[in-house]
Image (cartoon, rainbow, N blue to C red):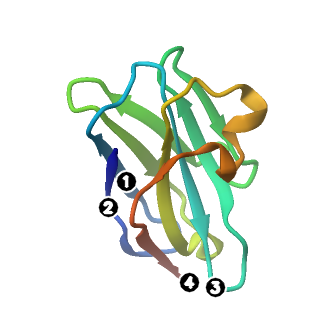
Amino acid sequence: VQLQASGGGLVQDGGSLRLSCAPSGSTSGSYTMAWFRQTSVKEREFVAGFRWQDKMTYYADSVKGRFTISRDNAKNTVYLQMNSLKPEDTAVYYCAVSPRRLITSAVRQGASYDYWGQGTQVTVSS
């Protein structure tokens, strides 16, 4: 499975961006996809997750109400709509996928995911 992530860029404080992640190759209908982010001074952290089979969504407290994770079945793509961006959202964002329907406690753990995209930079200027 390969993941193609895109949509990062430079935006001003309060602006919006939409990230996309499209898995290619063999994926089951029960997979779980998530976005994580990392900076040079912070460890990788969970941002949002989506469980394909039952459409359950999960968010980090820091992004809840501002970010929305969704899917497009026809395009087999998961999106992360990021609104009201803040400078502290600046990071490299990675999409990740597990071929399994992860239990809730595992969705937020990076170790649960088998495949990772190349990362896309998001920079929010103040």
Q: What residue type is labelled 2?
A: Gly
Taking the image as shown, residue 1 lies to the left or right of residue 82, namely left
Q: What element carries label 2?
A: loop
Give the labeled residue for mark 2. 7
**Foreground disc of the pair 4, 3:** 3
* Label located before the other in sequence (4 or 2): 2
Q: What residue type is labelled 3?
A: Ser
State how far apart marks 1 and 3 are (Cα): 22 Å
For label 2, the crowd category at 10 Å Cα-Cα, with few meaning under 14, some 14 to 19 and many 20 or more, is: some
Q: Residue 60 placed where, x, y %? A: 71, 48
* Label located before the other in sequence (3 or 2): 2
Taking the image as shown, residue 97 lies to the left or right of residue 105, namely left
Q: Which amino acid does label 4 sit on?
A: Ser
The residue sitting at 67% across, 66% down in the picture is 44
Give the labeled residue for mark 4. 126
The residue sitting at 72% across, 77% down in the picture is 42
Give the labeled residue for mark 1. 18
**Dots 1, 4 in contact, CB < 8 A:** no
Q: Is mark 1 on a helix, strand or loop?
A: strand
In the displayed structure, 95 sits above or below 121; it is above
Give the labeled residue for mark 3. 40
**Foreground disc of the pair 1, 3:** 3
State how far apart marks 4 and 3 are (Cα): 19 Å
**Dots 4, 2 in contact, CB < 8 A:** no
**Foreground disc of the pair 4, 2:** 2
Q: What element carries label 4?
A: loop
Quadrant (top left/top right/bottom left/bottom right) for the C terminus:
bottom right
**Dots 4, 3 in contact, CB < 8 A:** no
- The foreground one among 76 and 29 is 29
